[in-house]
């Protein structure tokens, strides 16, 4: 598993696609146990928190679409603001791009929900949440 210290990802915003950093986030790649597809993920929030939340976006959208929800939870993003503080609801959040989307790998062939479920389990194991 490779990690980059500063989380930067491509995200849809009202002004179009833009690279922007997540405050206090880290990003990297996990590998699917099915076919070694690389899965791009971002961890944000309080890594010491007991509550771990995996957000899985629908098939055709990248993880950046979770930004409005993260902002409501008090996790800073470039395109959200929140009256809450992350200290009010401490949690460690993982978002990721499904196979074929965003910065994740694009293996040839049809994708199944079974493959995508195994991808999510592989990611959880590699970030140490299982």
Image: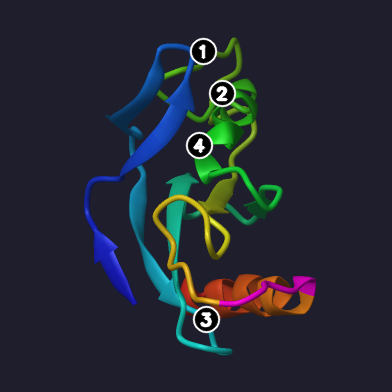
**Frontmost residue, 8 versus 38:** 38
Residue 122: x and y, percent?
57, 80
Residue 24: x and y, percent?
33, 39
Q: Marks 1 and 3, how far apart in space? A: 33 Å
Q: Which residue is mark 4?
A: 64
The residue at the point 50 percent across, 36 percent down is: 64
Q: Which residue is mark 1?
A: 81
Above or below, 6 against 13 in this view is below
Of discs 2 and 4, which sits in the foreground? 4
* Furthest residue in direction left, as rendered: 5
Quadrant assignment, res 130: bottom right
Quadrant in which the N terminus is drawn? bottom left
The residue at the point 69 percent across, 78 percent down is: 115
Q: Is residue 102 visible?
A: yes
Mark found first going from the N terminus, 4 or 3: 3
Above or below, 61 against 97 in this view is above
Q: Which residue is mark 3?
A: 32
Q: Are marks 1 and 4 in contact (CB under 8 Å)?
A: no
Q: Secondary structure at mark 4?
A: helix
Mark found first going from the N terminus, 1 or 3: 3
Mark found first going from the N terminus, 3 or 2: 3
Q: What residue range appears in magenta?
A: 109-113
Q: Which mark is residue 130?
A: none
Q: Are marks 2 and 1 in contact (CB under 8 Å)?
A: yes
Mark found first going from the N terminus, 2 or 4: 4
């Amino acid at each position: 598993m490779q990690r980059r210290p500063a989380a930067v990802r491509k995200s849809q915003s009202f002004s179009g696609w833009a690279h922007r950093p997540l405050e206090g986030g880290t990003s990297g790649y996990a590998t699917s146990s099915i076919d070694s597809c690389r899965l791009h993920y971002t961890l944000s929030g309080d890594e010491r928190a007991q509550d771990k939340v995996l957000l899985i976006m629908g098939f055709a959208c990248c993880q950046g679409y979770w930004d409005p929800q993260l902002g409501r939870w008090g996790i800073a993003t470039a395109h959200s603001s929140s009256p809450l503080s992350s200290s009010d609801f401490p949690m460690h959040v993982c978002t990721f791009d499904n196979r074929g989307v965003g910065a994740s790998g694009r293996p040839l062939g049809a994708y199944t929900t079974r493959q995508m479920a195994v991808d999510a389990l592989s990611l959880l194991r590699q970030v140490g949440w299982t």
